[in-house]
Image (cartoon, helix red, strand yellow):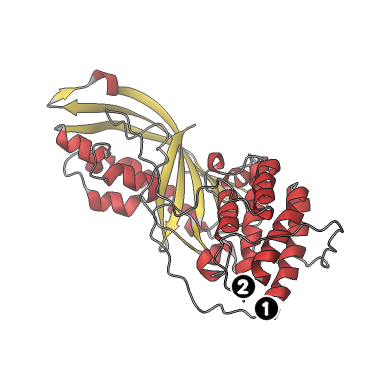
Amino acid sequence: MTTVINSQGGTTRSIVVGTPGFMASEQLAGRPTYASDLYSLGLTAIYLLTGKHPQALETESLTGDFIWRIHVPHMNPSLANVIDKAIQIHLRDRYITASDMLADLDLLKRGIEPTVIPSDSVAPSRSIPQVPYPITGSISQGQPTSPTPIVSSSLDYTSRDWKKRDAIIAGGLIGVSILAGAFVIRAQLSDIIASNNTSVSTERSDPLPTLTPTPSPVASPPPVASPIPNTSPTPEADNNETTSLVSNWLQSRSRIFASPFDLQLAAELTTGKLYWDLTNTGSKGVINWLIKNNAYYQYDNLNISNIQLIYNNGVSAEVHASWTENRSLFVNGQIDPTKSGSSSEYVSFMLRRVDGQWKIEDYKDI
């Protein structure tokens, strides 16, 4: 369900058809790419491995990454890295084409480690302009190190249990691969997952399975119908919460980017990349820079003309907003003319639900 709020306070609605939780943000917004199909393929593989719907999985509060590996303690970490790359939140961080993902899967099958950055690796340092401009422009990609999850010991599958799961995983991937246009990936991913699962009961020192190619084709298991998650519409109250958050953020900036530089308010409204950019105490932290340079922003004549909810899958959401305002950056009591003046903004806000509360994770100009 898409909700649009115009300048007169009226609303209009339209329907987004799809399976909440399994579709990438750009697909829900009506701009799918090949990487969108691979995103759905990766989440379907996780569903078959864990038995959990994406909306039932916990997410890392700072990055928004799905926390799913703790449910598959014997998962090959290199294969898990490939799946994680396919389900990254941002399109630029995923596999762009099926051939790219297939290349890494081929390396795994031959016992070669692909160059995939694990989801729990330390992010590079963030890039912030020397004079922060905390209203427009994309927030940079860095983020603090995610905490290492505690591996659960509740999944102690027998070899027979894993073989049954192999059939489900392989069959499900066949169906999803055809729909996603990633048919060539299906066989590779199914073979690697099968090899990973059947070796659970045997301790091994090497991180990758040793596979022996066979000249004869391997018979595919019978197709298994993929489960259909709940597609009930998102409640209207939840949609209103997302748009109200963006409006609240715009009106709260004068307390965040000026005295009292309210860090508690920033924590209530933001998460992930945006929260880190605002509050980190390094030289590139926006609030820290303002305080050290005796600077602050002043916002006048704010006029919000439109706030539109693009999508809401219950875990993440995207809201577009347009407004006009007069913005001034004061440094040592003097206006910086290069960062001041009247402006018209049209910005895309990426939202993430954290502990039942919507927060702004990122934003960029449209």
Instruction: Determine the CA span between mark 2 and mark 1.
Output: 7 Å
Q: Viewer-proximal residue, 181 or 316?
A: 181
Q: Residue at x 69, y 49 (%)?
A: 106
Horizontal relation, residue 342 to residue 244: left or right: left
Task: Give the percent coordinates (x, y) of residue 17.
Answer: 68, 52
Q: Residues within 10 Å of mark 1 (few under 14, many from 20)?
A: some
Most extreme residue toward the top is 337
Residue 307 in view, yes or no: no
Quarter of the view holding residue 19 = bottom right
Give x and y (percent) for residue 82.
59, 52
Q: Are the residues at dot 2 and dot 1 in contact (C-beta closer than 8 Å)?
A: yes
| Residue 273 in view here | yes
As helix, strand or loop, the secondary structure at mark 2 comes to loop
Residue bearing the label numbered 1: 159
- Which amino acid, by three-letter code, is at mark 2? Val
Q: Which mark is residue 200?
A: 2
Q: Position of residue 360 (x, y in %)?
A: 40, 48
